[in-house]
Image (cartoon, rainbow, N blue to C red):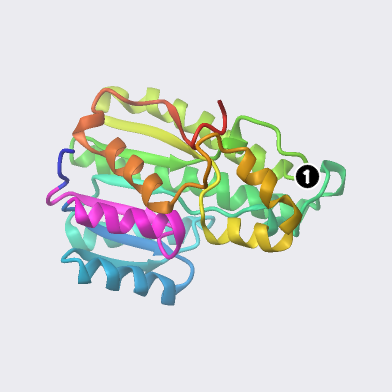
């Protein structure tokens, strides 16, 4: 794969799971990395791992649902490394952000706003501030993390499904708007990946573990590193003709 030497990459939700693995993968490919998230101790651990592997990274505490914090996050990339080339807008939250599993009529307005604010508004705000910096450098690439739940029904998780479906639509629209400017924008749709939220769900619903495994034709859950590899590929020149698409990284789940 084409290396990303001297490129500047931003990863939100970079303290755990897919975001953490992607930050490390970006660095391994030669990029300088900005790792953003809400928990500084987790971000610092990601930075430590990146630096131990010979890469460069900084941590920026950020709530992606807050415009001023997202603006400051992008500015930190510019101040530290001189610009921004790639972004993985990964930060999000699972159903538990909204207080658990609920039917639509039982979802509170507050929990709806929280889930949509992090998963959808957060992606919008990130692109709002990332794109102008990429335009200054003549182009770039953005990957937004959606979900297989963005194109299928998942009863009792309406706010999450709506937000992740919105990410796909937002990605497609942005991709068309900026295609002639050299900015490629895609989304990925992970299936069951062994991350903290999935592990939490397995603890909360042990009787559903066999069903979860049965939904993966490949016969296992994915790893954060497998998803990270897809993100890095989408940002590389090897994916130079790929934009505006939603790519399942799901072991055949949607199939």
> How many labels were placed on the picture?
1
Magenta span includes 13: yes
Q: Residue at x 29, y 43 (%)?
A: 232
Is 111 on the left-hand or right-hand side of 192? right
- The x and y percentages for residue 38 are 48, 67
Kindly give the residue lying farthest to the left in the view shown: 5
Q: Magenta stretch? A: 5-29
In the rendered view, tell whether residue 232 sits above or below residue 194. above
Quarter of the picture containing the C terminus is: top right
Q: Which residue is mark 1?
A: 156
Kindly give the residue lying farthest to the bottom in the view shown: 41
Q: Residue at x 38, y 27 (%)?
A: 175
- The x and y percentages for residue 83 are 21, 51
In front here: 185 or 71? 185
Quarter of the picture containing the N terminus is: top left
Is 27 on the left-hand or right-hand side of 169? left
Q: Residue at x 42, y 77 (%)?
A: 41
In the rendered view, tell whether residue 251 sits above or below residue 6. above
Which image quadrant for residue 81?
bottom left
Element carrying mark 1: loop
Is 232 on the left-hand or right-hand side of 168? left
Count neighbours of disc 1 (C-alpha within 10 A) and say few if under 14, some if 14 to 19, many if 20 or more: some
User: Visible in this render: residue 129?
Assistant: no
- The x and y percentages for residue 215 are 62, 38
Magenta span includes 67: no
Q: Residue at x 59, y 60 (%)?
A: 199
Which image quadrant for residue 142?
top left
In front here: 206 or 245? 206
- The x and y percentages for residue 157 are 72, 45
User: Visible in this render: residue 37?
Assistant: yes
């Amino acid at each position: 794969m084409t290396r990303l030497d001297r490129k500047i990459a931003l990863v939100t939700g970079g303290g755990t799971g897919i975001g953490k693995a992607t930050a490390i993968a970006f660095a391994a490919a030669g990029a300088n990395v900005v790792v953003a998230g809400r928990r500084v101790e987790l971000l610092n651990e990601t930075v430590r791992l990146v630096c131990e592997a010979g890469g460069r990274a900084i941590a920026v505490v950020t709530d992606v649902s807050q415009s001023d914090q997202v603006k400051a996050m992008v500015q930190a990339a510019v101040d530290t490394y001189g610009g921004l080339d790639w972004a993985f807008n990964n930060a999000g939250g699972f159903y538990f952000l909204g207080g658990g599993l609920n039917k639509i009529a039982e979802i509170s307005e507050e929990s709806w706003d929280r889930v949509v604010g992090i998963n959808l508004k957060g992606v919008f705000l990130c692109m709002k501030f990332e794109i102008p910096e990429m335009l200054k450098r003549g182009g770039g690439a953005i990957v937004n993390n959606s979900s297989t739940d963005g194109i299928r029904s998942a009863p009792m998780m309406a706010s999450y499904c709506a937000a992740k479906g919105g990410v796909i639509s937002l990605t497609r629209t942005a991709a068309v708007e900026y295609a002639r400017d050299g900015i490629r924008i895609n989304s990925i749709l992970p299936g069951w990946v062994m991350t903290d939220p999935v592990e939490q769900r397995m603890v909360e619903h042990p009787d559903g573990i066999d069903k979860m495994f049965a939904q993966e034709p490949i016969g296992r859950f994915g790893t954060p590193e497998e998803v990270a590899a897809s993100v890095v590929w989408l940002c590389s020149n090897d994916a130079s003709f790929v934009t505006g698409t939603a790519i399942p990284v799901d072991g055949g789940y949607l199939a």
